[in-house]
Image: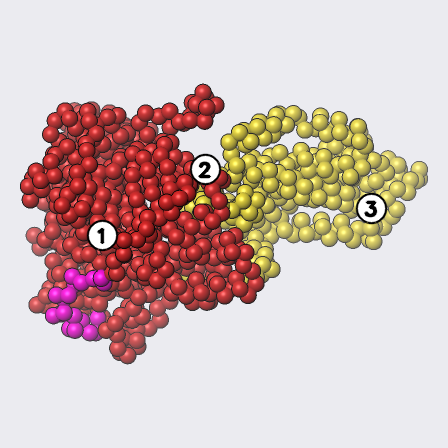
Amino acid sequence: MESNLITEDKQKNKLEKAFEILKTMASKPSGLIGLTIVLFHVVLALISPYIAPYDYKAISPNTMLLAPSAEHWFGTDSLGRDVFTRTILGGRTALTVTFFGSLIALLWGGLLGIFCGLVGGKIDDVVMRVVDAFLSIPWILAMLLIVSLLGTSTEVLIPALGFFYGKGIVRVARAATHDVIAKDFIVSARARGHSNMSIIWNEIIPNVRDAILVEGAMRWSWMLLGFSSLSFLGFGVSPPTPDWGLMISNARGLMSFAYWSVIAPIVGLSSLIIGINLTADAFAKALGIDRSTKAPV
Amino acid sequence: MNEIIESVKDLSIGFNSQKGKQISILRNVSTNIKKGETVGIVGESGSGKSTLALAMMGYIKQGLFPLKGECLFKSEDLLKMSSRQLEKIRGRKIAMIPQNAGQALTPNLKIGYQIDEALKLHTELNKTERDKKISELLNKVRLPSPETMAFRYPHELSGGQQQRVAVAMALAGKPDLLLLDEPTTGLDVTTQAHVLELLRFIAKDTGTSMIYVSHDLGAIAQVSDRIVVMYAGEIVLEGPARKILKEPIHPYTYGLLKSIPKLSLAGLPASMPGSQPQPGSINEGCSFYDRCNLATDNCKKNSPDLEHIKELDTNVRCFNYKELINKNNNLQTSITKKSNNSEANEVLNLKDVSISYAKQKFFDQLLNKISDQNPTVKDINIDIKKGETIALVGESGSGKSTILKSIAGLLKTKDGQIKFENDRILSSDLKMRNPNDLRAIQLIFQNPDESLNPNHTVEQILSQPLKLYFNLSGEELKKNIIDLLKKVRLGEFYMSRYPRQLSGGEKQRVAVARAFAAKPDIILCDEVTSALDVSVQAAVLNLLQQLKEDLGTTYVFVSHDLAVVRAISDRVAVLYQGRLCEIGPSQNVYKFPSHPYTEVLLGAVLEPDPDIKPKLVAEDIVEEKPPEKGCSFQGRCPRKIGDICNSEVPPWQIGENGNAIRCHINIEELASLQQ
């Protein structure tokens, strides 16, 4: 309400604006916690190769399934590898793959959604039915097919995950575009004779960007879960690369007497997902597109 | 009659800014509402009139809180009551009629049930008594056949009827005080006049006190006994309605009254410079100082108090009001505008244009034709001369905006042609038009909040057409933008601002600048002033007229407001249900003889003068669809002569003044009937 009442003469550049959004996000406990967790994981992923105490693939029959101790903080797994080392390294692949996967999902999903929302009519009908058809296929089956045909390298995983998680974004982007499309500034641009591309770029994207970004952030956390599920099933990262999904999968049989080798990767994965979710929520609220915060009057 | 029902004492309401500063929206407001009296609270948007009215029923919007003062209803302070205590008063003692009854009524409950709910809550009547009361109430608000009306759903009623139901619900608890927040603002001219008439009747009949909040001095003039004028959160003038409207002694009210276009006056109203200050921006001195032409140095430093003038029974907040006391005979003046050259060439011809909203059937889609025997807009023939301002007038649903859209190419026409500069037929498909024709026709929309991209700066907004049509860039682009801003009287520093940082009038100026950026031949104006405050409206009208005189642009001006149309237009076309009723030079259309529909419209115009009452000659029923055959106005015509009106389309008759009327009644006869 206040920003409408009091005009700010000072213009802010984009960096300051981004900083302001971050500040608003951090002003609430949930946002602060979320941001801290995400930041922690990102920093960890960057520095973990340098701080890891052991070699992640060093197998040793002498140290099989040791309980946590001063030497091995999180204990060791069934092949005698240090769980702490593998846990702090285990988020790297997941983060990289899902981050770039989400970017791809955002790009194609967002642009296609905006385009469909703008042109409408038959093109929109056809595209949306195809998207619906893809939505009806259980993604994990399709992923398994792709992975078994093309392999499990990151060059395959990133676009494949990006494609499957972008479908939902198409719908969100299309709905957001529909909200904007009826406004007079779009009609005005049309009447002036601007091309569709110019209308999308200049008039629509600035107004739907926020909604799509928030959706993308949510998709990121879902994709993390999806990627870990693939690893868990043995279709994600191949051993001996450390990965949370893979670690959980390897250690689950020994859960009853060597719980440590399961708990550490689970905590890593779930804290990252919770962190991203909290951050996405705070992001939405900071941008003012979260409906639940609107006053009832 | 002199018993005071509610009194507001030294009330200030405000909010805390993000920086922790206290900002007040209402400042030291005191007023009394007497029994049986109707008080009109008038002010522009942001003046605090709604905040004041809501505080009078003990309601303060979220985020706001009272800083000091009290609202005494029968000597109890409403602002200190618990919500339990307020429940007992709201509805029973103080009732409210909202602005938009269509949104205030629950859509899935029959209106009889909704009134019954109000009765159950506020009275101790039993079922049969309540049923009787419901039809009594519906009768009182003059709804046709109350018995069947009670079984209808809100969406089955027209806007005016919904507003009547809201009045009936408010009356259910027999309140002592009725609060009306812009109750007629969203309604058509004729409906508005009817609802106001009803409210006046109810005030007299039941002896209820009313608080009528509106920005529209015309509506306030019709109902109020006393008027409170608000400006920037303060009462600046308060007194008997007649005194305030005829002899305003505050410079703001004086300027406001002068800026309202009037039916009796040709030419443009005088505008007030500037706009209302934002809350929190007034530090010292009079809040009207910047816009006042009586201001002295004293006004800059000291804020005047509300002074009571006994002989006029008026309170005024001004140091220099005495200068206005005997100056008021020149309220009826206007700026004469240059008339266009009538020998000019025609620039746009609409020939037999019809437009249909009907959905194409599959078979028609294949053949690419529209088969609608009864299109929304039919047989429109208008020739528009270069440099003239032609206005399309009608109520909602008259097809005026539809015609505008198809001139712009946004809507396909069903039949007929639109010819540009006599030699080119404009395609009804936007994509088929050549870029130069697109450039030649520009649009200005009603609401600048929607027509300007909220994420673009003014510079980006104005550069769009310049880049598209003239391929400008760099320094040249910037120079052109500054020129445009100058043309619409905005400074260079506006370039870096976003629309949300501008006031309503400034936004509309930017929209005007964007239209002129294309160097167009024709500008289509779709209700361009109806979202603006009165004083700002006058300024925008003057600006449009100035630009037209300088650049020779042609305007097609769509409006529902007959007084605005009178002020700006050279020629007027009156539309009803998508058919032309009357067309002619504006000074003649506003004289008799007129088409019966024009007569109805003119009769319903509300002037800010308590002596000019609207003449209600027709019912305010709303027709969904144009009639299949005969005259379009047959359903509501007060001068209908018989079957011929239902079966044959009336012929055009040219009056001696040059206005064409489409009616079966002979034009001389019409003239004598309307004398």
Of the numbered discs 2 and 1, the one sitting upstream in the chain is 2
Residue name at image x 65 percent, y 35 percent: A165
Q: Work out whether residue B546 can be spotted.
A: yes
Q: Quadrant of the N terminus of chain A?
A: bottom left
Local crowd at mark 1 within 10 Å, few (<14), some, or many (≥20)?
Answer: many
The chain drawn in red is B
Q: Splitting the image into 4 quarters, where does residue B576 fall?
A: top left
Q: Is residue B335 magenta?
A: yes
Q: Amino acid at mark 3?
A: Thr
Dot 1 corresponds to which residue? B566
Magenta highlight range: B318-336
Q: Splitting the image into 4 quarters, where does residue B412 fall?
A: top left
CA distance separating discs 3 and 1: 83 Å
| Circle 3 SS class | helix
Q: Amino acid at mark 2?
A: Asp
The label nearer to you, 3 versus 1, is: 1
CA distance separating discs 2 and 3: 67 Å
Residue name at image x 29 percent, y 42 percent: B382
Local crowd at mark 2 within 10 Å, few (<14), some, or many (≥20)?
Answer: some
The label nearer to you, 2 versus 1, is: 2
Residue name at image x 26 percent, y 35 percent: B579
| Circle 2 SS class | loop
Q: Amino acid at mark 1?
A: Arg
The chain drawn in yellow is A
Same chain assignment for discs 2 and 1: yes
Q: Position of residue A141 (x, y in %)?
A: 71, 25
Q: Chain of mark 2?
A: B
Of the numbered discs in the image, which one, if any, rests on residue B429? Answer: 2
Dot 3 corresponds to which residue? A85
